Image (spheres, coloured by chain):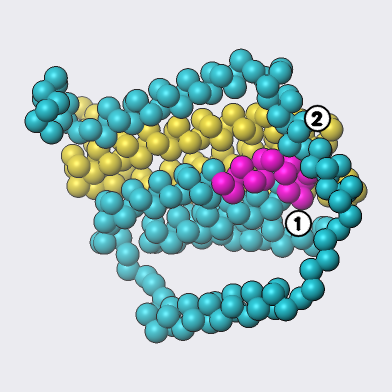
Chain colours: A yellow, B cyan
Amino acid sequence: MSAGLPLSYSLVLSAVLFTIGVAGVLVRRNALVIFMSIELMLNAANLAFVAFARQMRSVDGQILVFFVMTVAAAEVAVGLAIIVNLFRLRETVFVDEVNLLKG
Amino acid sequence: MIYVFAALAATLLTSALLVVLHRNPVTSALFLVLAFCSLGGIYLLLGAEFVGLVQVIVYAGAIMVLFLFVIMYLNLQHDTESGVPTALRRGLGWIMGAVLLAEGLALMGRRWQPGPASEAPAYLQGNTQAVGQALYTRYLFPFEITSMVLLVAMVGVIVIARGRGAARLGGAEEES
């Protein structure tokens, strides 16, 4: 299992995945899809952590992935609660129709 | 091994693109499940068995169920315009079911040959034990802080999702 798979492959894959996540945040207007794109970005960072942990023969990167997953779970729960509350208030989940803080 | 990686990476990138590009949020969420599962496979390939399985269990299991629950709770019908025709979808469902059945039958018909017993503990000793030992020794304090993060998130979600009407009532809990 230790042979093959250079580090650069995983890092390129992580970069492309992160880019897709960024594009999703920028392009989409649906707040739920934006949250999914944020999850994609977090997972891209996790992939980089795992790839470096394998490269350095260390387990610390995988521990960090564990923590990132925990924070992502908390973030998704809070964010979805906010979206539910927003939908109750404005009957929409499209982020450009939400301008409560606009002066 | 490089071909397995290439296949998983192609699945991951395709489904990630479809998450972003698809119009229906439910379909996006299901493609995100596929992306997380293929990413779990990549973690397995990179020698991180514990993280790969936790990825499938926590992300594809718990977080995506939460996503789908909220999407269906909000009932966003006006956002769905594209879609596979119903007959095609139903036909694909039957075909997939038939493939699954044939797969199960083929597995049942095969003779099972368990490997040597001495190999299993040596394999299991690799990743999960190392992660557990690091998690409960060097990273014990951050691990405990993690539980605090989850507790704060849980309380915050309950407070936010209770809504404004319930929050205005304040101490009058018995009316709800």
Q: Could you give the CA–CA distance between mark 1 and mark 2, rounded to whole angstroms?
A: 21 Å
- For residue B48, side relative to residue A67 (left or right): right
Q: Nearer the viewer, residue B165 or B104?
A: B104
- For residue A72, side relative to residue B3 (left or right): left
Q: Nearer the viewer, residue A82 or B114?
A: B114
Q: Please state which of the two labelled residues, at mark 1 or mark 2, is closer to the viewer.
A: 2
- For residue B52, side relative to residue B123 (left or right): left
**Whole-percent x, y for residue B106 in the image:** 70, 78
Q: Secondary structure at mark 1?
A: helix
- Could you classify mark 2 by the number of other residues whose Cα lies within 10 Å: few (under 14), some (14-19), or many (20 or more)? some
Q: Chain of mark 1?
A: B
The answer to whether B151 is drawn above or below residue B54 in the figure is above
Q: Amino acid at mark 2?
A: Ser
Which residue is found at the position 64% from the left and 18% from the top?
A: B140
Q: Chain of mark 2?
A: A
Magenta segment's dominant SS is: helix
Are tags 1 and 2 found on a single chain? Answer: no
Q: Which residues are magenta?
A: B44-57
Residue on which the image places disc 2: A58
**Whole-percent x, y for residue B52 in the image:** 67, 45
**Whole-percent x, y for residue B160 in the image:** 27, 30
Q: Quadrant of the C terminus of chain A?
A: top left
Which residue is found at the position 33% from the left and 31% from the top?
A: B157
Report the disc number at residue B5.
Answer: 1
Q: Is residue B92 visible?
A: no
Which residue is found at the position 64% from the left and 61% from the top?
A: B11
- For residue A38, side relative to residue B71 (left or right): right
